Structures are given as C-alpha cells and as structure tokens.
C-alpha cells in the first residue's frame, strides 16, 4: 500500500480555509493570533464560518477538515481548573459547530502530560480527532508521553522534535515515528518550509503542518497593536508545500 502523508495548514480566517482546500490539504488548524502568540482559541463564529467555507468549496467532494486550536491564553501549558473548564466548554462548542477535530495540550507543573486534563478534553471531543500540540516539545521523556497519549485516545501529536524548527529536530522526529509505530500519528510542525518537507517525510512522519503565511502591513494605531500588521495564508507557499509533499512521496 502506498504511503500517505497529509498536509495541514494553520489558518486564521475563511480565506485560509479556501486556500487550503484549493491546494488539497487534508485539514486546517484554525487559530486566532497565530503570529503574535503561537495561536489561541478562535471564536465559535469563526469555526462555524470555516466549516461552512470548507463545505462550500468541496461541493459534492470531501471538505477540508477544520480542527480548531483550543488554547485560552498565551504562555505555558499548565492550566488551572477554571482554565480547563473553559477549554472543555470550547471543545464542546467546536464540535457543535461542526469541527472534525480539535487541537489541545496540557502539562503538569513538573513538565509531564496532564493525563486528567487530556482525558477530559478527549471526552469533550465526543469521538472527533484530538491532536496534542507542541506542548509535547517541552516534555523531557517524549517516548513515555507518546505512550500515554496513545492510551488516552489522542489521534496525533504536532511536534518539531523538540527543536525550534522541525528540520532541526528531524532525528528526534524519526525516533518518535519509530517508537509510535502508528499508535499515534506524528505530524511535523514548527518553522516548516516547503524545502524541508522531503527530509520530514523521509523521517517517517504521517503529516506535515505549516502556516504558509505572509504578513500584510496595516497600522492599527496605539489601541490596535501599532504597525505590526497581520498574517494571511499565502496561496503560492501553500501550493509549494503541496507540491513538496507529492514530490517527497513520489521519491520513496
């Protein structure tokens, strides 16, 4: 059987969903404030609009899957009971809005996967796919973390192999893919460029994740973030990533 490697694109709006669908991505991670914070939970309205856009583009075909990130604030991944309660509510709301899955992550104060939190979030997802995000990249014993996440019913892990960029963590990604052995899908993400895709696919990952973005200049003034502008999904970068995945698979 031919090997499959999915393409996932992190997007922040319905235009990003349409571009991802246009280039044949399997799914999108839907976020807010991606560039400024690493991503936060999108509004329910945006989730609903993204699911509708995916269905509209697909027509009679299979829509690109919408997987909202559930993260209530920037910073670390140790959450209070109140913050976990919000995340459980957000997961349920995302599922009700038509999301195909959710992206979550929670750690204990001593840097381990928070099994109780993950168990609650998986339950709230009601059988939808659950991706554990790059919180895993700050876990020291990643093999034990993979074992635990598999037992908790997590579908996949988004990881750079513990490095700032996935291409720098490719050796660890290879080890993680070997250890996981299909029990949890391994998705390479973090600073991924189209030219990195071949090496990541060769390492044995199940999917490649990137933002495929460009920044637009737009001065929001002193009350709107100044002149930092905002990010949008770039069709050319997304298409280059799609081509890179196809070329990497063809060369196996």
Image: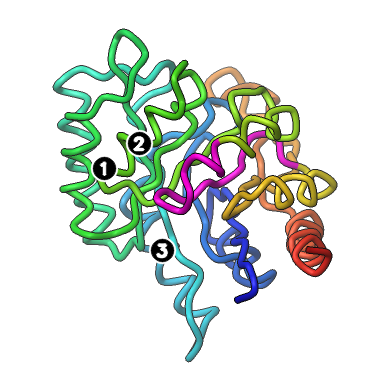
Measured Cα–Cα span from mark 3 to mark 2? 35 Å
**In percent of the image, x 45 and y 36: which residue is there?**
133
In this figure, which residue is indicated by the disc labeled 1?
151
Name the image colouring. rainbow
**In percent of the image, x 59 and y 54: which residue is there?**
207
Image: 49 above or below 223: below
In this figure, which residue is indicated by the disc labeled 2?
147
Horizontal side of residue 191 vs 205, given as left or right: right
Question: Foreground mark, 3 or 2?
Answer: 2
The percent position of residue 33, horizontal first and vertical second, equals 52, 34
Residue sitting nearer the eye, 154 or 18 = 154
Mark earlier in primary sequence (1, 3)? 3
**In percent of the image, x 59 and y 24: which residue is there?**
162
Task: Give residue 49's mark.
Answer: 3
Sort mark 3 into few (<14), some (14-19) or many (20+) by Cα contacts within 10 Å: some
Mark earlier in primary sequence (3, 2)? 3
Measured Cα–Cα span from mark 1 to mark 3? 33 Å
**In percent of the image, x 61 and y 48: which residue is there?**
209
Q: Quadrant of the C terminus?
A: bottom right
The percent position of residue 20, horizontal first and vertical second, equals 62, 63
Quadrant hosting residue 117: top left
Mark 2 vs 1: CB contact within 8 A: yes
Residue sitting nearer the eye, 206 or 50 = 206
Measured Cα–Cα span from mark 2 to mark 1? 6 Å
Which element type, helix, strand or loop, lies under badge 1?
helix
Q: Which residues are magenta?
A: 176-192
Q: Residue furthest bottom?
A: 60
The percent position of residue 21, horizontal first and vertical second, equals 60, 70
Horizontal side of residue 209 vs 179, given as left or right: right
Q: Quadrant of the N terminus?
A: bottom right
Which element type, helix, strand or loop, lies under badge 2?
helix
Within the magenta stretch, is there residue 189? Answer: yes
């Amino acid at each position: 059987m031919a090997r499959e490697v999915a393409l996932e694109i992190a997007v922040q709006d319905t235009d990003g969903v349409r571009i991802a669908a246009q280039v044949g991505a399997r799914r999108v991670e839907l976020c807010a404030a991606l560039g400024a914070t690493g991503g936060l939970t999108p509004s329910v309205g945006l989730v609903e609009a993204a699911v509708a856009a995916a269905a509209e583009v697909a027509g009679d075909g299979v829509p690109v899957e919408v997987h909202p990130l559930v993260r209530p604030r920037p910073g670390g991944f140790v959450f209070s009971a109140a913050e976990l309660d919000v995340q459980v509510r957000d997961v349920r709301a995302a599922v009700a809005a038509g999301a195909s899955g959710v992206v979550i992550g929670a750690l204990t104060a001593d840097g381990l996967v928070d099994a109780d939190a993950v168990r609650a979030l998986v339950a709230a997802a009601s059988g939808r796919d659950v991706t554990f995000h790059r919180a895993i990249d700050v876990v020291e014993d990643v093999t034990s973390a993979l074992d635990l996440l598999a037992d908790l019913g997590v579908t996949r892990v988004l990881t750079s192999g513990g490095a700032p960029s996935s291409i720098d963590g490719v050796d660890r990604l290879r080890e993680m893919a070997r250890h996981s052995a299909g029990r949890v899908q391994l998705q390479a993400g973090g600073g991924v460029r189209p030219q990195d895709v071949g090496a990541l696919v060769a390492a044995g990952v199940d999917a490649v994740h990137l933002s495929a973005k460009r920044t637009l200049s737009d001065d929001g003034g002193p009350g709107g973030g100044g002149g930092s502008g905002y990010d949008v999904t770039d069709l050319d970068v997304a298409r280059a990533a799609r081509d890179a995945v196809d070329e990497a698979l063809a060369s196996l």
